[in-house]
Image (cartoon, rainbow, N blue to C red):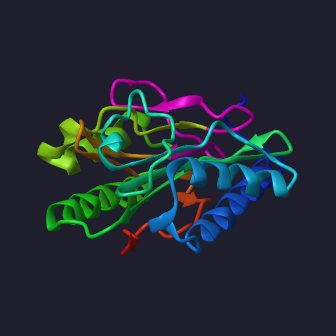
Amino acid sequence: MAQVKTKDEINKIKKACRVTDAIFGKILKLDLQNTTEIELRDFILVEIKKRGLRPSFKPIVTSGKHTGNEIHPFEPLDKKLKGFVIIDFGVVYEKYMSDMTRTIYVGIPTKYEKDLYNKLLASQIGAIKISKAGEKCASIDAYVRKYLGKDGKYFIHTLGHGVGTRIHELPRIYYKTIKPVLKENMVITIEPGLYIKNKFGMRIEDTCLITKKGCTPLTKSPKELIVVK
């Protein structure tokens, strides 16, 4: 029953998502070329605290080759941001949570890096488009893996999960989870990622509301690759 949210619960999650978007907007105004991973993590925590809120989970800020190690993400380091930068955080608003990941690039990406990011973004947008009440969770995850093709071997976690008073709730959006079906007013994440160990990684995540007609992202920060030169 907790998987399907009431109107009041949805409104609280929406407010948490709006705060998350506002903080990300402030991140983009920083001098990111001269910001360390630790400084960015601490900036996020300060911005959350300023609003009288707390984080949904310990913010993840990782860059460079460490972004390729998704399963055991490194603690933020005292080193300047470089290459792909994964920023994953959320806030708690009256017990209800948001969860968003954006990946930006500090420096000049190669054509391969840009093309791979755009492929991941297209898979995430496609997954959102096919998600709606009545759709099997497994089929959405399977869609992304098929879209990624040969690069799907770098997608090493589930596509998403429910969000509410806990940051990870049911349903589990994964091709091996056969039975669960999306229902109206569920709130889930859709977060494909690609991780090439010791080279680089990337993830794009939105908190989304499931409706009869489709899937509405509640986190609305820009997803096109932002390059900070």
User: 101 or 63: nearer the eye?
Assistant: 63
Q: Identify the residue at image location x=68%, y=67%.
A: 22
User: 70 or 36: nearer the eye?
Assistant: 36
Q: Answer whether residue 180 is magenta in the image.
A: yes
Residue 167 can be seen, yes or no: yes
Residue 205 can be seen, yes or no: no
Residue 82 position, x and y percent, is 36, 58
Instruction: Report the side of 196 relative to 93 (left or right).
Output: left
Quadrant in which residue 96 is drawn:
top right
Number of numbered discs visible in the structure rendering: 0
Q: Answer whether residue 192 is magenta in the image.
A: no
Residue 79 position, x and y percent, is 45, 49
Looking at the picture, does residue 83 appear above or below residue 74? below
User: The N terminus is located in which quarter?
Assistant: top right
Looking at the picture, does residue 53 appear above or below residue 82? above
Instruction: Report the side of 186 relative to 165 (left or right).
Output: left
User: The C terminus is located in which quarter?
Assistant: bottom left
Quadrant in which residue 178 is drawn:
top left
Residue 51 position, x and y percent, is 84, 57
Q: Please, which residue is most extreme toward the left here?
A: 150
Instruction: Report the side of 62 relative to 195 (left or right).
Output: right
Give the extent of the magenta segment. Answer: 163-189
Residue 167 position, x and y percent, is 64, 34
Q: Identify the residue at image location x=44%, y=56%.
A: 80
User: 41 or 142: nearer the eye?
Assistant: 41
Name the magenta segment's main secondary structure: loop
Instruction: Report the side of 129 relative to 187 (left or right).
Output: left
Looking at the picture, does residue 81 appear above or below residue 186? below
Q: Identify the residue at image location x=67%, y=63%.
A: 23
